[in-house]
Image: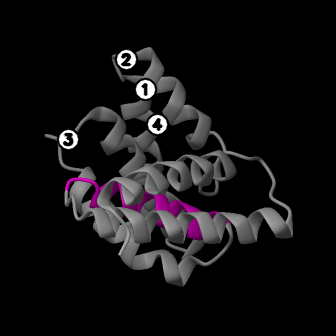
Amino acid sequence: MIDVDVHRKLGSITNNRSWNLIESAELTAEESEELLATAMASVYHWTAVGDSEKFPARDLLAGAALLKIGLTKMSEGFVQRAYDALSPADRAEWEQAFAHAVRAWYLWQCGETDTARAHYQQAKEIGENMPDPEDRMIFFNTFDLIPPPLAV
């Protein structure tokens, strides 16, 4: 049995590597495989830690990773859980922005362009109005690589 501190450390390492890959403009086939592996490893480790406060971020990462490599259908549950948990107005701006951005990405890949546009625009507005410049920069590093829904 793996110690919870080891799970936490490995969850953090795999989370960070996954986001670095997600923020890449293009992925090779090998990088796509690495992204799938690191994202799912991160899900495994954060689930083992058992901190339910981390689950929405875990689901956001998994959803974004699966979307990045074109596994739209597999991303559905992760994207929905992350959106449900992170989009309410009482969440931090960066959480809301990411929730709307990843939801827009998912909807766009499903062909729901009008709804995707609305979420994309909401994510962009929340991101532009983030009071913390570091949070804004981190958000837009990822957001700028999400394909905008047609004609946005």
Check the image and report above or below for 25 versus 30. Answer: above
- Alpha carbons under labels 2 and 4: distance apart: 15 Å
**Sooner in the amino-acid sequence: mark 1 or mark 3:** 3
| Residue type at tag 1 | Asp
**Residue drawn at x 64%, y 57% as measured from the top left:** 150
- Alpha carbons under labels 2 and 3: distance apart: 15 Å
Comparing labels 4 and 1, the label whose residue is closer to the camera: 1
Query: Looking at the rendered structure, which numbered label has been put on residue 135?
Result: 1
> Element under label 2?
loop
Which span is picked out in magenta? 53-68
Query: Looking at the rendered structure, which numbered label has been put on residue 132?
Result: 2
Query: Looking at the rendered structure, which numbered label has been put on residue 91?
Result: 3
Residue 9 appears in view: yes
**Sooner in the amino-acid sequence: mark 2 or mark 3:** 3
Q: Position of residue 139 (x, y in %)?
A: 49, 35
* Residue 70: quarter of image: bottom right
For this rendering, which residue is in front, 82 or 58?
Answer: 58
> Element under label 1?
helix
Residue 114 appears in view: no
**Residue drawn at x 26%, y 51% as measured from the top left:** 86
Q: Which residue is mark 4?
A: 124
Q: Position of residue 21 (x, y in %)?
A: 68, 52
Whether 66 is among the magenta residues is yes
Circles 4, 3 touching at the beta carbon (< 8 Å): no
| Residue type at tag 4 | Lys
